Amino acid sequence: MSTTENNEKDVLKAENTKAQMRKGVLEMCILGIISGEELYTTDIINKLKENDLVVVEGTVYPLLTRLKKGGLLEYTWKESSSGPPRKYYRITDSGEALLTELLDSWNQLVKVVSKTTKK
């Protein structure tokens, strides 16, 4: 195998790993974005993109549904001036509690990984 092929495989592995890491924290990020305000799905996606967590609607909608079924989010329908009513999500008390727990765990993980990987 040539050096170029090895480099291409390494890049693909790195991209896959980065994608898996983003996917793993997406639930926490969505809960964090919704915490404190009601948001429409497009607003949630836009905030994710603004923070370089580029995702597609096909990823976000099922996740929102799962979070809703888990009692972490709830929604209300609101009239829209530009079309049909829209579903606005808000975090529940259970969602806030989970977000706090996830953020504590995340911060501990970041600290451990930083300490472990210092050269």
Image (cartoon, rainbow, N blue to C red):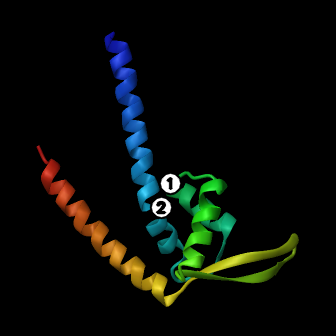
Q: Are marks 1 and 2 in contact (CB under 8 Å)?
A: yes
Task: Mark 1: give few (<14), some (14-19) or many (20+) Cα within 10 Å.
Answer: some
In the picture provided, is 50 more to the left or to the right than 42?
Answer: left
Relative to the observer, which residue lies in front, 90 or 64?
Answer: 64
The image position of residue 60, as x and y in percent, is 60, 61
Circle 2 — which element? helix
Residue pictured at 64% horizontal, 78% vertical = 89
The residue furthest top is 2
Q: Residue 12 placed where, x, y %?
A: 42, 31
Q: Is residue 19 above or below residue 90?
A: above
Which mark's residue is nearer the viewer, 1 or 2? 2
* 30 lies left or right of 7: right
Residue positioned 13% across, 48% down in the render: 118
* Residue visible at 76% across and 82% down in the picture: 77
Foreground residue among 95 and 65:
65
Percent across and percent down for residue 32 are 47, 73
Point out residue 54 in the picture as x, y percentages from the top left corner.
55, 51
- Figure quadrant of residue 40: bottom right
Q: Real-space Cα distance between discs 1 and 2? A: 8 Å
The quadrant the C terminus occupies is top left
SS state under label 1: loop
Give the label on residue 26, or none. 2
| Residue lying at the far bottom of the rendered structure | 93
Report the amino acid beneath label 1: Leu
With 66 as the anchor, is 94 left or right in this view? left
